[in-house]
């Protein structure tokens, strides 16, 4: 391999060509996936089992830090191998069986994930925020035969176990360390304690034999479910391993282009990442947990997010990278404890999963002089990352989510387009706005048990994202809005993310969400729900005038709500706008576009 070191700046095209050249780590190949010729990373790990086996090379370095517990890479491998044998030998789990995980962020979550995928079973992370009824839905929908839960999720599930005919055993890990979990039985389901099931972990623990294929099912990640029942996106080993390479590639490209000015990780030593988002979300599982296992990084887990606790852990564990979703970063910056803590170890602040206000880049640069901000874009259906922007690019284009990784195709498609794949003869260019379509080896095969919906959302390998976007002359993606969140006011399309971005530039605004409200004349108006920063006071007239300075008059909200409590969000960090409308407008007014 050639020496990739170069004096910055290096153009995007030059850096991509250098990194993907024959013989380089990021060399690109082409394979046929579901009858579609697809560019892939030639050197990507073939399966998740391969990643787990490679992690043994990090030996006795810390992998997981949870409260006062520390687990090394070697210790984690032995535990995962032991639990994998329990699944096969004690619970008769075979290749293709589904094993669910329903718990908050705990070390056992990680162990169960890798044990399941290493034997060819399909892991099903369930939303820990769900009610018992919703958890039961996920278990029935996926047909899970084993579930691993914490005590709180066990209590929610117990009344529903009789409704789960496929579930053989519920394994319970205790988040309240030191308290015993009693074995039990509810109907046909055995309830077993994690510690009893795992038993003694031998020093020479080895994985059961299994021959896996890159394109077989590895996971079912449920979508947010803001409307109707959640859908399970079925990811293959190739999908998930592609995401790992995508993340490594964007980091390598930024470093090659900008030198230390584009580096997202530490200059030397092992990275230390603060896991502040749920593991059951694609960002937490695929972009943080998985990359750390492969890279030898220390994963510092938070049971639930709290900005003051986050700052404490940044100082104690010398965290090099943190983030999650933009609102978490903003809460850390706004914390009254920020100036009391040593945050000098932080070299990268990365986030995604929700629109980020452009002003956040400036604030990060002010608070972290040596920290590089980065913003990624992806969906559950793209196994997390599709594009990312960082370093000087992000400073220059703070409203972009970056260019797609080179194994990915993107297209902007008119809303009236009915074809199966983008038509190159239709209008294109930086002035064209439309639905973003994505094709690449990270796009899932479809939704579990929903062939018709899968066929509507994925056509000839192209995922129809539902996001409204545009592409500039360099191929950088700009997410304008979710298609379903476009507000149509007197014939004018208003993109809520643009109005929110304008509101975020006001120094008194800590958080906000823009929603459509009924208007008897124009059909629909613009409403804004605002959370103010501590100690500030501002009225709707001032905020309306502020928006008017940045956007055309038809974008200015005609209605403001000022609230003290945090805006409702799903685990991915997206504001639950339907819940806001229900609360503020009343369910009977839901004729307003969603």
Image (spheres, helix red, strand yellow):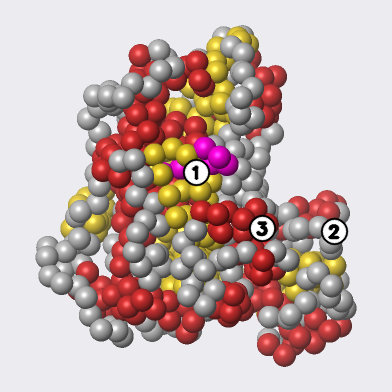
SS majority, magenta: strand
Question: In the image, which disc is placed on residue 307?
Answer: 3
Q: In the figure, residue 117 lies in which quadrant?
A: top left
Q: Earlier in the sequence, mark 2 or mark 3?
A: 3
Marks 2 and 3 sit apart, C-alpha to C-alpha, by 28 Å
Residue span colored magenta: 63-69
Q: Position of residue 73 (x, y in %)?
A: 36, 40
Question: In the image, which disc is placed on residue 584?
Answer: 2
Marks 1 and 2 sit apart, C-alpha to C-alpha, by 41 Å
545 is within the stretch colored magenta:
no
Q: Residues within 10 Å of mark 3 (few under 14, many from 20)?
A: many
Q: In the figure, residue 333 lies in which quadrant?
A: bottom right
107 in relation to 33, above or below: above
As drawn, is 386 to the left or to the right of 49?
Answer: right
- Asked if one can make out residue 490 in the rendered structure from this viewpoint, the answer is no
- Quarter of the image with the N terminus is bottom left
Q: Identify the secondary structure beneath mark 1.
A: strand
219 in relation to 439, above or below: above
- Quarter of the image with the C terminus is bottom right
Would you name the residue on which mark 1 appears?
A: 65
Q: Position of residue 225 (x, y in %)?
A: 61, 45
């Amino acid at each position: 391999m050639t020496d990739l070191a170069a004096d910055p700046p290096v153009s995007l095209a030059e850096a991509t060509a250098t990194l993907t050249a024959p013989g380089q780590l990021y060399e690109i190949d082409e394979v046929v996936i579901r009858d579609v010729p697809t560019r892939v990373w030639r050197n990507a790990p073939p399966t998740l089992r391969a990643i787990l086996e490679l992690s043994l090379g990090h030996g006795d370095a810390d992998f997981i830090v949870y409260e006062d517990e520390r687990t090394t890479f070697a210790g984690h491998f032995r535990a995962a191998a032991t639990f994998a044998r329990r699944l096969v030998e004690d619970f008769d789990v075979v290749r293709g069986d589904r094993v669910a995980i329903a718990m908050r962020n705990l070390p056992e979550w990680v162990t169960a994930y890798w044990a399941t995928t290493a034997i060819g079973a399909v892991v099903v992370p369930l939303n820990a925020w769900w009610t018992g009824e919703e958890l039961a839905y996920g278990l029935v929908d996926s047909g899970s035969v084993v579930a691993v839960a914490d005590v709180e999720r066990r209590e929610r599930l117990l009344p529903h176990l009789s409704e789960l005919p496929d579930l053989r055993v519920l394994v319970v890990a205790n988040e309240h360390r030191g308290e015993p979990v009693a074995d039990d039985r509810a109907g046909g389901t055995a309830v077993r304690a994690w510690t009893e099931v795992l038993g003694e972990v031998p020093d020479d623990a080895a994985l059961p034999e299994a021959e896996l294929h890159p394109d077989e099912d590895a996971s079912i990640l449920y979508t947010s479910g803001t409307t109707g029942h959640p859908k399970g996106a079925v990811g293959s080993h190739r999908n998930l391993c592609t995401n790992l390479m995508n993340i490594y590639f964007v980091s390598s490209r930024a470093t090659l282009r900008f030198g230390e000015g584009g580096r997202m990780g530490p200059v030397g030593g092992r990275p230390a990442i603060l896991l502040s988002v749920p593991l059951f979300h694609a960002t937490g599982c695929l972009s943080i947990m998985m990359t750390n296992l492969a890279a030898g990084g220390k994963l510092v887990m938070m049971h639930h997010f709290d900005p003051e606790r986050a700052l404490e852990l940044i100082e104690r564990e010398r965290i090099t990278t943190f983030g999650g979703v933009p609102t978490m970063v903003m809460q850390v910056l706004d914390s009254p404890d920020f100036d009391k803590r040593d945050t000098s170890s932080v070299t990268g602040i990365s986030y995604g999963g929700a629109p980020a206000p452009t002003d956040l880049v400036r604030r990060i640069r002010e608070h972290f002089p040596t920290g590089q901000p980065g913003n990624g874009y992806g969906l559950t259906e793209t196994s997390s990352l599709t594009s990312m922007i960082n370093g000087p690019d992000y400073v220059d284009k703070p409203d972009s989510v970056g260019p797609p990784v080179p194994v990915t195709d993107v297209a902007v498609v008119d809303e009236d387009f009915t074809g199966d794949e983008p038509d190159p003869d239709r209008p294109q260019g930086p002035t064209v706005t439309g639905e973003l379509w994505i094709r690449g080896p990270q796009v899932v095969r479809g939704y579990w048990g929903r062939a018709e919906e899968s066929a509507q959302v994925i056509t000839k390998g192209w995922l129809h994202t539902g996001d409204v976007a545009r592409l500039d002359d360099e191929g950088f993606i700009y997410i304008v809005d979710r298609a379903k969140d476009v507000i149509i006011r007197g014939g004018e399309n208003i993109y809520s993310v643009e109005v929110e971005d304008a509101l975020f530039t006001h120094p008194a605004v800590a958080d906000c969400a823009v929603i459509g409200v009924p208007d008897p004349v124009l059909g629909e108006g613009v409403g804004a729900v605002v959370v103010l920063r501590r100690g500030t006071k501002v009225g709707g007239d001032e905020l309306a005038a502020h928006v008017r300075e940045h956007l055309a008059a038809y974008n200015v909200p005609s209605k403001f709500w000022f609230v003290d409590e945090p805006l409702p969000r799903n685990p991915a960090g997206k504001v639950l706008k339907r819940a806001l409308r229900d609360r503020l407008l009343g369910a009977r007014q839901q004729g307003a576009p969603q």
